[in-house]
Amino acid sequence: MRIYIRAIIRCSDNRTLDGYVVNVDAYAFGVFVGNTEFAFNTNLKSDCREELGRLAIAMDSSPDSIKPLAFSTDFHDAKGFLIAGELAMP
């Protein structure tokens, strides 16, 4: 079962983007720039690197200047903790 949770994604340069994380462990996530969605699955490292490059181009930036990416949500996990953290990027 997958749960998509609305999230705010913060780049290392402090820009924020709308997005989502999949499940509490955020093994996959998506980021929106304008009308374009950039989807990541941390289990597919080469795909993540390629998608990160596309995201950086859309943001007129470089991959190193936007990562690490952090996320925050308005939702709590089963233990009552706010679902937030840093997204694993290659």
Image (cartoon, helix red, strand yellow):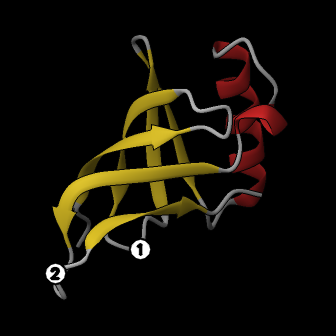
Q: Quick one: which residue is furthest to the front in this view?
A: 14
Q: Residue at x 16, y 81 (%)?
A: 80
Front-lying residue, 11 or 57:
11
Q: Residue at x 46, y 34 (%)?
A: 31
Query: Which sits earlier in the primary sequence, circle 1 or circle 2?
Result: 1
- Helix, strand or loop at label 2? It is loop
Amino acid tagged 1: Asp
Q: Residue 7 occupies which quadrant of the picture?
A: top left
Residue 17 image position (x, y, % from top left): 44, 29
Are circles 1 and 2 on residues that touch, CB within 8 Å?
no
Q: Residues under labels 1 and 2: Cα distance?
A: 15 Å
Q: Residue at x 69, y 48 (%)?
A: 48
Q: Nearer the viewer, mark 1 or mark 2?
A: 2
The residue pinned by badge 2 equals 80
Q: Is residue 89 left or right of residue 26?
A: right
Q: Is residue 62 left or right of residue 41?
A: right
Q: Is residue 51 above or below residue 54?
A: below
Q: Neighbour class for label 2 at 10 Å: few (<14), some, many (≥20)?
A: few
Q: Residue at x 43, y 11 (%)?
A: 34
Residue 6 image position (x, y, % from top left): 25, 45
Q: Which mark is residue 25?
A: 1
Residue 60 image position (x, y, % from top left): 72, 11
Amino acid tagged 2: Gly
Position of the N terminus, as image quadrant, is: bottom left
Q: Which mark is residue 15?
A: none
Residue 84 image position (x, y, % from top left): 38, 62
Q: Neighbour class for label 1 at 10 Å: few (<14), some, many (≥20)?
A: few
Front-lying residue, 61 or 32:
61
How many numbered callouts?
2
Q: Is residue 67 above or below residue 86?
A: above
